[in-house]
Amino acid sequence: MTRAEWKESLGIALQTMRSQKLRSFLTMLGVVIGVASVISVAAIISGLNQHISDKMHEIGTQSFFITRFRLFTVDFERLEEEIRQRKHLKPEDAVAIRDQCPSVFKASPVLTRALFLGGSNEVRYKDRHVEEPILRGAEPELVDTLPIYQVRDGRFLTHDENTHAAQVALLGDAIAANLFGAVDPLGKEVRVNGLPFTVIGVFEPHQGLFGGPGVDDFVIIPYKTFAKMYPEIEEVIITVCTTDPSLLPQAQEEVAEVLRRRRNVPANKDNDFEITSPDLLTDLWGNLTSAIVMLTLIIASIGLLVGGIGVMNIMLVSVTERTSEIGVRKAVGARKKDIGAQFLLESMAITSVGGLLGVLSGIVFSLSVAAVFPDLPAHVSIVWILVGLFLSVAVGLFFGIYPAVKAAAMDPVRCLRYE
């Protein structure tokens, strides 16, 4: 077919859709839903992936954590007995890591008291109070090992304050705002779980992941002050950083060697501690979202399959309704491929318009979700838009072949006799 013939056939296809708007819309509805599902879920997942990646970079691309158990372990009773009996990490381990690991820049032990760990906290200033902040004991090196702890006003802890167990504290931005409002909190005295502390700093605003706890919800006090207040809390986390992200694997090997030696781990035994980097968290999230995307594609494929069957059904009805037209066209010289191309183009036009509507619907839905739920960002990728449009055209092509072939093979004499 020439370009003019293709253009004429496409014009006929669009005219047919305009003359039967409701039927065409209902026919393409399955394609609209399928494509919209792909676009909206892909946009939300893409936004979430970027959100997670940004949060992990805030933690630090050259940082990692050492813990007694794997991070996010909730059900300790299900752990093997050998794992449950692991020795606690000690602040001296952080000192050994700093002194004996050439690739390590800083290492800092951290103690935490929070409601989700079985401890309740309160910070009070005069008649105002904040319930259930996360109380953390740290050394001055914490700001080097975890860049998310950026001090906006005031300063961080000093070695003297830690050595002498001084009662000083830094507050998250949200806590400072709730306690002091527009008043400058620096130098003011707050009561942390009933004890007086002088505020020496306020952190930069930092919300947590998906509305969870972030730096905004933290109160930081010297490590030795914390240990003196709560000697029963022994669960130490050691944060470690290097000067360069490329040194991370080497630093982790050096740390593992030092800790195995200090903890007397036999050569034939696995580590009795866990080393976790932010990249591991990103990879876990990526695996989870990949599974969600695959599930969505399967569901969307079902929608597209149903839509494609609907398109084929309507096109077969259209072939029957236009039998006389087919006969007339063949009588005046239309070839089989001309008739087939016309019906194939009509099928593809229906699904293409459905795909375009699906893309627009998916974009509107994903942006609406992002507007209503700010913790669920959405990023509409041009790649997924092209995938959605390609799928819609492919559905029209595949399910339009049989009706097109049937129309092209019809006997013109019988067509002209049809009433």
Image (spheres, helix red, strand yellow):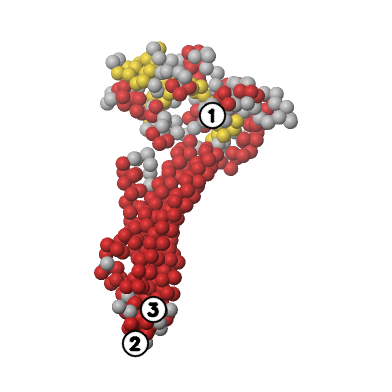
Residue at label 1?
73
Give the camera-side residue of 177 and 38.
38
Q: Residues within 10 Å of mark 3 (few under 14, many from 20)?
A: many
The first of marks 1 and 3 along the sequence is: 1
Kind of residue indicated by mark 1: Thr
**Above or below — where is 226 with respect to 282?**
above
Q: Amino acid at mark 3?
A: Ile
- Quarter of the picture holding the N terminus: bottom left
Earlier-in-chain disc, 1 versus 2: 1
Q: How crowded is the residue under tag 1: few (<14 C-alpha within 10 Å), some, or many (20+)?
A: few
What is the secondary structure assignment of the residue under circle 1?
loop
Q: Which residue is mark 3?
A: 339
Q: How many marks?
A: 3
254 or 22, which lies in front?
Answer: 22
Measured Cα–Cα span from mark 2 to mark 3: 12 Å
In the figure, residue 398 lies in which quadrant? Answer: bottom left
**Residue at the image point whose x is 28% and y is 25% from the top:** 181
The residue positioned 51% from the left and 22% from the top of the image is 111
Q: Quadrant of residue 352?
A: bottom left
Q: Position of residue 346 (x, y in %)?
A: 36, 70
Q: Nearer the viewer, mark 1 or mark 3?
A: 3
Q: Which residue is under mark 2? A: 332
Q: Looking at the image, which is closer to me, 28 or 245?
A: 28
Amino acid type at circle 2 is Val
Question: On screen, 418 above or below 276?
Answer: below
Coordinates of residue 321 in the picture (x, y in percent): 32, 73
Q: Earlier in the sequence, mark 2 or mark 3?
A: 2
Q: Residue at x 33, y 54 (%)?
A: 361
Across and down, in percent, residue 408 comes to 41, 78
Asked if residue 231 lies left or right of residue 397, the reply is right
